[in-house]
Amino acid sequence: MDKVRPLLVFSLQLLCSCQAASTLSNGFFYQDIINGNGNGEIFFNGVKLQIEAQLPSVFTVSGNNITLPCNFWYEPPLSSPRKVRVKWAWLPVFGDSESDVLVAIDHRHRSFGDFKDRVYLQQDFPGDISLVITNVSLNDSGQYRCEVIDGLEDESATVHLELRGVVFPYQPRHGRYHMTFRAARQACEEQDAAVATFDQLYTAWEEGLDWCNAGWLADGTVQYPITQPRTPCGGLDLAPGLRSYGMRHKHMHRYDVFCFSSSIRGRVYYLQHPQRLNFTEAVQACVEDGAQIAKVGHLFAAWKFLGLDRCDAGWLADGSLRYPITNPRPNCGPNEPGVRSFGFPSPYHKHGVYCYSSR
């Protein structure tokens, strides 16, 4: 009998330690027994947890703060509050699995990955678990899942975050069809942009984008938008729309790319300088003016969102020469608004320059 007792005590200790360890999730201790209120509600006899995301989709631009709405309640209402575990997760537009964004219990919370210290719960009223994302980035778009766990009860709802912006075709100095998918993604990032999604390109086509060179999209397909059918661009017999090459090999095949840029903080301006500048001089002139030479994404965003209109060609950070037109007029290119391009001239040529200031 004396030999059995220590073994029994050890077994009970082991069982308790295992049960305690199983309640750890993302560093948060959770155990349903903390919700006991003496009113018989702990086991949810006849009580149903409800959750709702009031808007299926939310739209914003990069740099803004945005709130993804979500709240929960009980039916019938409880006589006293209960502690719950709240979790927000994110599925990127072309992601394979969800990533944790934020986990919270009561007033304690933890954020993860690229969202660390950039998200929090709104909590304006009981049951309000809306997620606030600060300084939204181009890569934040996708589906967000709001989940509430109370003991054995587990309910969730989803909200889609979409960024508004401008799509522009891009090819590097080397010319047409020189980029693998990885190179294309890097090229967009260097221009303060991201590889466009199909939906973003489709919206741009609806708004009039017409481009005959095929480019990578974020899902690994290669497509191009045509509003005016013509022989070199799929033929006259095809209706307007997106022409698709389908999925391409990301490492072997080479194309241009369609980039997506959202709104910018700060301003883009044509530098008033007493003389024309070569590329090196143009970079330095922006620095001396307390700014930096503008990127292609900066110029497109300023044209789209700020109405930048200037009939003077200027250097940009990639070595290209461009100018933005919102009000078409004689001697300023075609009759449609857009960002005009002169390609990549010799860096020794003398031109103006567009600068970007974040202030």
Image: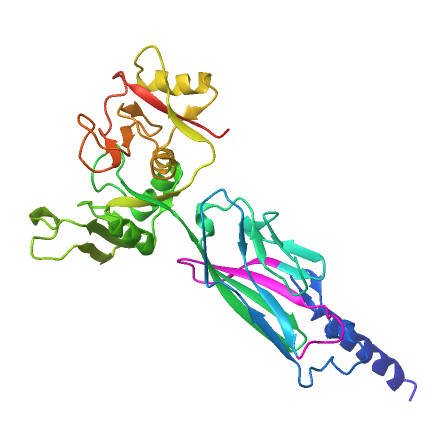
Q: Which corner quadrant of the image does residue 176 belong to?
A: top left
Of residues 180 and 159, which is closer to you in this image?
Answer: 159
Q: Which corner quadrant of the image does residue 127 belong to?
A: bottom right
Q: Position of residue 216 (x, y in %)?
A: 28, 49
Does the image show residue 250?
Answer: no
The furthest residue to the right? 2
Name above or below for residue 246 compared with residue 352. Answer: below
Does the image show residue 109?
Answer: yes
Residue appearing at x 58%, y 47% in the figure: 118
Q: Which corner quadrant of the image does residue 247 belong to?
A: bottom left
Q: Position of residue 167 (x, y in %)?
A: 31, 45
Of residues 347 and 60, which is closer to you in this image?
Answer: 60
The image shows a total of numbered marks equal to 0
Q: Position of residue 128 (x, y in %)?
A: 63, 62
Name above or below for residue 283 compared with residue 296. Answer: above
Is residue 100 highlighted in magenta? yes
Q: Which region shows up in magenta?
A: 76-102
Is residue 263 highlighted in magenta? no
Q: Position of residue 130 (x, y in %)?
A: 59, 59
In this rendering, would 299 be left or right of 102? left
Residue appearing at x 25%, y 37% in the figure: 337
Q: Quadrant of the N terminus?
A: bottom right
Residue appearing at x 26%, y 25% in the figure: 311
